Image (spheres, rainbow, N blue to C red):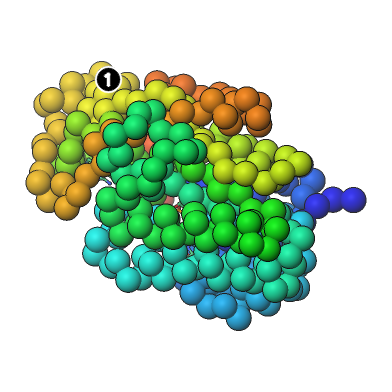
Amino acid sequence: MSKTALITGINGQDGSYLAELLLDKQYDVYGLVREISNLTLLEPILSDIALLHGDVTNQTSLDTAVNEIQPDEVYNLAAQSSVAASWGDPVATGEVTALGVLRVLEAVRQHCPDARLFQASSAEVFGNVEEMPQRETTPFCPRSPYGVAKVYAHWATVNYRETYGMFCCNGILFNHESPRRGIEFVTRKITNGVARIHNGLDTELRLGNLDAMRDWGFAGDYVKAMWMMLQQDEPDDYVVATGEAHSVRDFVDIAFSEVGLNYEDYVVVDPKFFRPAEVNFMLGDVSKTKKILGWEPDVAFNELVRMMVLVDLEIFNSVKSDNRSIFGDLD
Ligand code: NDP
Ligand code: GDR
């Protein structure tokens, strides 16, 4: 019999990849979306999934969804997921990214306690901790309202596992990117900027801290780890990372090189994009996840940058050819 999964945040980057993975595995896939949610990333699979309206700030909507669907697996991906934006609205970030998780846990406990639950925890829980690389036992030391909210969510998930015996797992996810990444994150801002400059639409790209180091992987690989966690005999928490760190500058350099440009001619460092508190260096120790789940990332850093640049270039090419078909040949 096919399994049933409920995904919150299904229309986001990870949600869309995870929905595709679960459809391939013959799951019945349900997703929670808001009235205002943009469904573009789900367009190719809209006829294969079922969407319900709800919001992690609204307990009733979660109770109703979980009670009606009776899912075998719940993937809680919903969050205000931008670290940078979390300083601008710390209270709303806490409502969604911290208390929203508690509401999902409560909905599952009350209405479907045998469901297995994945919580999207984050490497931001570690902040600027000295231990390097960071593993499941590294102390938490968050540096942003987002990181603080994820710490709350992480411990709430552990507590429901320990207190109620529920099958709850935290995936401590390091940065993962793709052509579906939101433009507010640095990687997609860079690849979109490269495509714009390459097409003569911009002459510069304004960025913040180029020296920050991140452990960047491919989102399509990371959703496989989420699924694997819920297939184990026992629930546990796992770091998901590549074990390799690169600077923002490295990313920029490779992205501009893809179109034969030198980033130093185009990138302007703008203090506007510096953060009130920065996490300087993130690097994950993924040995437990490799050993117990048997998970390995498939896409290497250089391939990831290339993939994102190529897709952004294609997007501009298709916009140009659409304009040609409407207005005739523009060249
Ligand atoms: P996205 O920002 O792409 O997706 C976030 C999703 O949450 C969207 O579908 C959004 O829907 C939804 N959402 C926001 N607010 C609410 C709300 N009040 N109620 C219900 N849904 C809401 O993030 P990613 O896909 O990249 O990340 C998925 C999860 O993994 C997040 O929890 C994120 O914090 C976490 N994470 C991500 C990492 C990464 O590098 N990508 C690393 C570590 C953790 P809407 O369109 O309506 O806003
Ligand atoms: P992050 O991702 O904060 O690590 O959170 P982001 O891509 O926003 O920043 C990465 C690093 O790049 C530096 N940076 C810039 N960042 C942005 N957004 N815009 C800029 O112009 C810019 N210039 C330099 C930042 O200072 C930072 O050091 C992501 C999110 O997916 C979270 O949800 C997730 O939990 C963590 O990764 C792990």
331 sits left or right of 39 in the view: left
Q: Is residue 126 above or below residue 81?
A: above
Q: Nearer the viewer, residue 260 or 116?
A: 116
Which residue shows up at 18% across the image and 21% down it? 262
When asked about the image quadrant of residue 207, the answer is top left
Which residue shows up at 44% across the image and 46% down it? 122
**Some atom of ligand 2 lies within 8 Å of the CB belonging to the residue at label 1:** no
| Callout 1 secondary element | helix
Furthest residue in direction bottom, as rendered: 60
Task: List x then y, in percent, for residue 187.
Answer: 33, 38
Task: List x then y, in percent, for residue 129.
Answer: 30, 39
Image quarter for ligand 2: top left
- Residue 112 is at least partly visible in this image: yes
- Residue 330 is at least partly visible in this image: no
Residue type indicated by callout 1: Ser
Residue highlighted by disc 1: 257
Which residue shows up at 39% across the image and 60% down it? 149
Name the quadrant of the C terminus.
Answer: top left
Which residue shows up at 15% across the image and 33% down it? 267
Q: Is residue 67 above or below residue 280?
A: below
Q: Nearer the viewer, residue 247 or 184?
A: 247
Task: List x then y, in percent, for residue 238.
Answer: 55, 39
Q: What number of labels is visible?
A: 1
